[in-house]
Image (cartoon, rainbow, N blue to C red):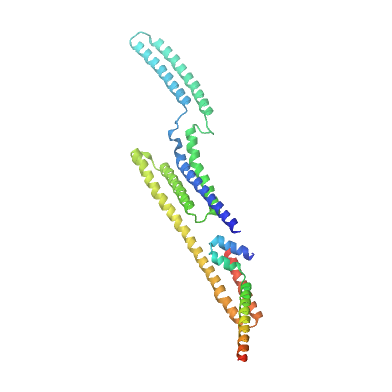
């Protein structure tokens, strides 16, 4: 049975919450991937800021 | 997309309103239908008149014999004459009865409605049974689409109560002899018994139905727990591990394994 069909059946048969339905529809791997990308972007920004600060300190 | 969704919701609401109105009309009709025969004549007017005519003729024959007997008593006719006359009258009476009975039978057959002697008997038989069949159809259709819609469930409750009341009324009326009580008390007692039976039966069924709802609620809470664990525990742990330089492949294979097991379980639940 396909994932979509399983969710559809669970929703119809047991009236599971819309919130749970939505969470099941999303792939966990995809979500992790997105979160890592976000974390990487933040880390990159922090690294740039760190480098800039270090440069400022050196100039002082 | 959102507009389309809203349009569908409006259509669904309109559809439910039509269902609700139809159910109310159906409930009213089905409650009245089993009593439609009350004002109908028990016999067809032509049959009634023919029966009256036959009885009248029989009385005429009997009265003629009585008159002749009186004449014999007063010695106005001889015994032999009396015997001859009464023999003749009895013969004529027998012939008349045979002829009129056959005529009556033919008339009854010609006035039959779908094989029933009168429209009244047909109405009783038909309108008592028809609601059960239609009711089954309504319940079947509703069971496919029924959701917790306020006015729809109210209409359905009204329909169900009417059906139970009518069903029990007819069952009690059929099984209980009317000679046991005065007529008005008899009908009031049937109505009271039917109301009590209907309430008890509906509540009993609701109780069994709720048992099923409790089971569904348990499944819902387990599905909620699964999604909560997946979002707040598995995902967070995986993220922390990846960010702390644990090998990606290892984490991915564990997540895949977790997902596979989860979907297998959910598939079994959904079946």
Residue B46 seen: yes
Closer to us: B230 or B39: B230
Residue drawn at 53 percent across, 27 percent down: B110
Left or right, B114 with respect to B168, comes to right
Residue drawn at 44 percent across, 15 percent down: B89
Residue B271 seen: no
Quadrant occupied by the C terminus of chain B: bottom right
The correct choice, above or below, for B109 with respect to B258 in the image is: above
Quadrant occupied by the N terminus of chain B: bottom right
Left or right, B35 with respect to B76, comes to right
Left or right, B38 with respect to B7, comes to left
The correct choice, above or below, for B143 with respect to B48 in the image is: below
Q: Quadrant of residue B85?
A: top left
The mark tally for this picture is 0
- Residue most toward the right? B249
Measured as percent of width and height from the top left, residue A50 is found at 61, 86
Measured as percent of width and height from the top left, residue B172 is found at 41, 44
Residue drawn at 54 percent across, 66 percent down: A19
Closer to us: B249 or B160: B249
Residue drawn at 49 percent across, 33 percent down: B119
Measured as percent of width and height from the top left, residue B51 is found at 45, 24
Closer to us: A53 or B122: A53
């Amino acid at each position: 049975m396909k994932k979509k069909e399983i969710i559809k059946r669970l929703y119809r048969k047991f009236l599971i919450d819309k919130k749970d339905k939505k969470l099941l529809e999303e792939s966990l791997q995809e979500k992790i991937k997105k979160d890592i990308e976000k974390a990487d972007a933040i880390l990159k920004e922090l690294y740039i800021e760190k480098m800039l600060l270090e440069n400022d300190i050196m100039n002082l | 997309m959102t507009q389309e969704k809203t349009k569908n919701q409006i259509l669904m609401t309109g559809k439910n309103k039509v269902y609700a109105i139809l159910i109310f009309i159906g409930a009213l009709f089905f409650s009245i239908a089993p009593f439609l025969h009350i004002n109908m004549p028990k016999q067809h007017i032509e049959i009634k008149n023919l029966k009256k005519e036959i009885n009248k003729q029989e009385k005429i024959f009997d009265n003629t014999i009585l008159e002749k007997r009186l004449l014999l008593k007063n010695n106005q006719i001889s015994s032999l004459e009396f015997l001859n006359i009464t023999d003749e009258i009895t013969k004529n009476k027998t012939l008349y009865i045979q002829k009129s009975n056959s005529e009556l039978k033919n008339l009854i057959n010609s006035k039959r409605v779908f094989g029933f002697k009168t429209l009244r008997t047909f109405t009783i038989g038909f309108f008592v049974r028809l609601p059960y069949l239609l009711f089954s159809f309504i319940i079947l259709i509703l069971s496919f689409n029924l959701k917790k819609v306020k006015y729809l469930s109210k209409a359905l409750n009204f329909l169900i109560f009417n059906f139970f009341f009518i069903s029990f009324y007819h069952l009690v009326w059929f099984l209980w002899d009317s000679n046991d009580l005065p007529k008005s008390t008899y009908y009031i007692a049937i109505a009271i018994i039917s109301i009590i039976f209907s309430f008890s039966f509906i509540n009993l069924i609701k109780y069994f139905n709720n048992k099923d709802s409790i089971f569904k609620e348990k499944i819902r809470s387990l599905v909620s727990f699964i999604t909560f664990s997946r979002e707040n525990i598995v995902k967070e742990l995986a993220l922390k591990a990846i960010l702390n330089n644990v090998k990606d492949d290892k984490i991915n294979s564990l997540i895949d394994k977790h997902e596979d097991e989860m979907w297998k379980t959910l598939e079994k639940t959904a079946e």
